[in-house]
Image (cartoon, helix red, strand yellow):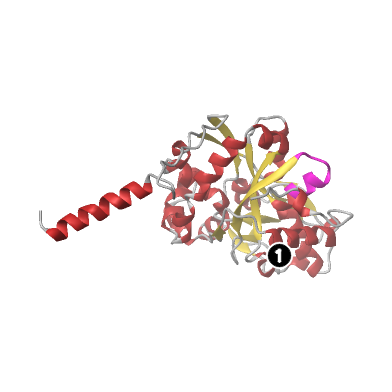
Amino acid sequence: MDRARRIAVALLLTVTAAACTGTGGEPRPRPAPPERAVIKVGIMPTTGAVPLLIADSRGFFKEEGLTVEPVVVTGGAAALPQLDTRMLDIAQTDYVSALAAHNMGKDLTIVGGLHRAGPRSFGLVTGADSRIKTPADLKGKKIAVNNLMSMSTLMVTAVLKDAGLKAEDVLLVETPFPEMEARLVKGKADAAWLAEPFVTQGERHHALRRIPDSAGDRLTGLPVGGWAVSGTWARDNPRTLAAFRRALAKTQPLTANGRAEAERTLPTFTKIDRGVAEAAELGVYTTGIDERGVQRIADHMLLHGYVENPLHIKKVLAAG
């Protein structure tokens, strides 16, 4: 073996050894196994759930000793009570639902961030042939939202206020995101607060159109949701929670460096085609908790009467 090849082999062996050892040359200890090998995780059928589905399909949870069973929920307000009853171990939630629940005394902790909204991640929509042109036309109308007391209702309230209306001027009706298009087409609702990829799907079907509103400016870049657990569950299952977070962290390079992974994943758990996935607004995926952004949401909740007093958000956010 010539000298150059001997040097290359030596370098390769050095790198391989370093990858298997700590800074002191000792083998890195494997994390202790999670307390729970199988966990049920509530997710919404929207672009926000993509990181969990990627982690599952890529085997990242399996690498951490976890089997994740996704459970589709309509929203955070519907999922959070299931944490108390242990029907769910972890739940995707919007921050409004989580902060409202915590403010009511629920034992709740936000353990990770998930999704920042893009300019078109959500929207107020109506039927393609509707006479509704502006938010001012919504007085006395029926508006579909995925959950009451949620990010959806807060944004609708803000848009109505900009148009000189109050929340009491409309009727809010709970409807799962995937069913909103059909509800509008059949005339069972006049408008809807809809999330991607269903906004793009409805536009491609020529069934829906956006109502120009001020929500995009408020939402763009704002953290709209994260992962929640009950405080008791977090204390009882610290290794399980750590394994869950490590697996999700492995998705960051895949979601940060392009859309391809998200576009491949979306059609696997929503009834959309690849063309809709490629056109949908994805926003930005993150695992960290944006404390400043969550505080902005809390301030909007106070402004629009969702809470009576300022919220101390640090009490609901997990450390680290």
Q: Is residue 25 left or right of residue 7?
A: right
The crowding category of the residue bearing disc 1, from other C-alpha atoms within 10 Å (few below 14, some 14 to 19, many at least 20), is some
Instruction: State the residue in front, 168 or 27.
Output: 27
- Residue 295: x and y, percent? 75, 60
Residue 30 in sight:
yes
Q: Which residues are magenta?
A: 98-107
198 relative to 159 in the view: left or right: left
Horizontally, residue 234 falls left or right of residue 62, namely: right
Which of the two residues, 56 or 176, is positioned nearer the viewer here? 56
Q: Is residue 305 above or below residue 16?
A: below
Secondary structure of the residue carrying numbered label 1: loop
State yes or no: residue 103 in magenta. yes
| Count of residue discs | 1
Q: Give how far across and how far down residue 40 sits, in percent.
A: 58, 33
Task: Tell me the kind of residue under disc 1.
Answer: Ile
Task: Examine the image and state in which quarter residue 306 appears.
Answer: bottom right
Tell me what residue is drawn at x 52 percent, y 45 percent.
246
Residue at the spot x=47%, y=49% of the render?
Answer: 250
Disc 1 designates what residue? 132
Percent across and percent down for residue 237 are 63, 33
Q: Is residue 55 above or below residue 192?
A: above
Q: 45 or 187: which is nearer to us? A: 45
Placement of 177 over or under 211, stated as above or below: above
Residue sitting at x 71%, y 62%: 292
Residue farthest to the front, as pictured: 24
By secondary structure, the bulk of the magenta-drawn segment is best described as: helix
Residue 281: x %, y % from top left: 54, 61
Q: Residue at x 60, y 51 (%)?
A: 181
- Find the residue positioned furthest to the left: 1
The answer to whether residue 229 is magenta is no
Q: Residue furthest right?
A: 308
On the question of residue 186 being in view, the answer is no
